[in-house]
Amino acid sequence: MTDEELVGLKKYQYIRIKKDNPILKGLLENRKVAIYFERAYNDDMNRFLNREYDILLDRLNDHNIAFIYAPLWLKDLDESIKFNIPNSTLKSLGIKIGVKDFYKIIDDSLVTKPVLNLPMILVSDPENEADYSTDKLGDDKMGLYCYYIEDGMDLLNRYRPTEYPCIFDHPSPIRYHKADTVEEEGILFRDGDDVEPDIAPQDRADWGDIETLSYEIQYRIQRLYDMGLNESFIRQIITLPEAKLSPLTITDDFRIILPDYNNMEIVMHPQSKTLYFFYLRHTEGVLFKHLRDHHEELYNLYSLLSPRENLDKMNQSIDDLVDSTKNTINVVCSRIKSTFASKFQDMLACQYYIKGAAGTPKRITLNRSLVKDVSNLIMQH
């Protein structure tokens, strides 16, 4: 069956596109992508895509295909820039691109024009699976499957291309699922030099909160990847400054601020902040099992940072923190790590949180020349 006959049946058309635009070059060469494209605004399709976006994103990614829906993609592009280069935004980089600009870039780059004026999905063919003659492609062009859409539900239920890979054919929507254990997420801190007991009852609520936050962080990172928005791609389409560490300022009221990241505040509970300030003080690091030797110092810090007035409860909190038979220290370190990892990429975040290999002292590796202690709480040590 020829392309013309297939177009007549409103199935698909094989077309070519030039990769001379940085955005298209970055998209098409970064990984296999499916791009929603329309020449004129289609209200029904846009309402459908906004409603069913997550299902389509997951279904296409089950085939390792990034899904590009411009209205949401451009919004998350800015979020991804801030996550990877936390002192930058599209606005600060002087870049302005809207949905119409995005569609115009595609339209202007099409060598073969779609023959039907319908909404469509353009799926890249980087391996030339269609065996399109190379003399019609060349280094500056790429082939695309152009799937025409009359009804959004075709993407979910009825659309079954037979001549080309069935990219939309899956028995059920694929949802990102939480790993069976928190450790599988690769987010939470685990201390290898202490025997890890069951979670103490008083810590279970905190642990559940951290597990949820860990999942949300992983989902956010996965979602950006599913949309083709990783740092490698962004650097192909935008000239970005190198990601740099921000100084860390401790204010006179003990808040933690990263001034070079748009004065980002890192919010911690008093118990977490106590442990964090303790490790900022101890640049050489401290093994978890040796924290009991620093009980008085930790208590003094906690008494300044906690609004509690019950001295017995304050003392109990520190007892729990330094007790190697309890899980409190892991919970607190996990919370600290997740707080930073939820704000920006781990290549930067790992410099700020507490870490250390099994059997070695745990420490914060941030160069202390970057720490400005207005409170003098750290420098008092």
Image (cartoon, rainbow, N blue to C red):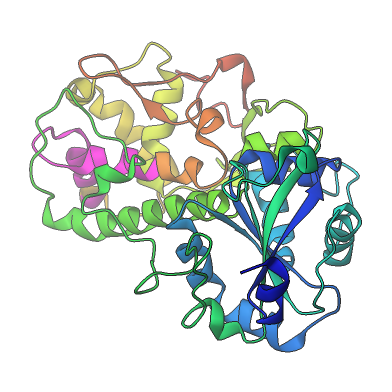
Image quadrant containing the C terminus = top left
Look at 67% across and 85% down and name the residue there: 150
**In the drawing, does residue 312 fall left or right of residue 335?**
left
Q: Nearer the viewer, residue 102 or 144?
A: 144
Look at 49% across and 59% down and name the residue there: 165
Where on the picture, by quarter, is residue 176? Answer: bottom left
Q: Is residue 316 located in the magenta-colored stretch of the structure?
A: yes
Q: Nearer the viewer, residue 208 or 68?
A: 68
x then y, percent, for residue 272: 38, 42
x then y, percent, for residue 95: 88, 47
Q: How many marks?
A: 0
Where on the picture, by quarter, is residue 241? Answer: top right
Magenta extent: 313-336
Q: Is residue 318 located in the magenta-colored stretch of the structure?
A: yes
Q: Main secondary structure of the magenta part?
A: helix
Look at 34% across and 39% down and name the residue there: 186
Residue farthest to the top, as pictured: 284
**In the drawing, does residue 26 fall left or right of residue 54?**
right
Residue 178 position (above or below residue 185): below
Image quadrant containing the N terminus = bottom right
x then y, percent, for residue 375: 59, 32
Q: Can residue 296 be seen in this snapshot?
A: yes
x then y, percent, for residue 273: 43, 40
Q: Nearer the viewer, residue 376 or 28?
A: 28
Look at 21% across and 50% down and name the residue there: 181
Q: Can residue 251 be seen in this snapshot?
A: no
**In the drawing, does residue 327 fall left or right of residue 169?**
left
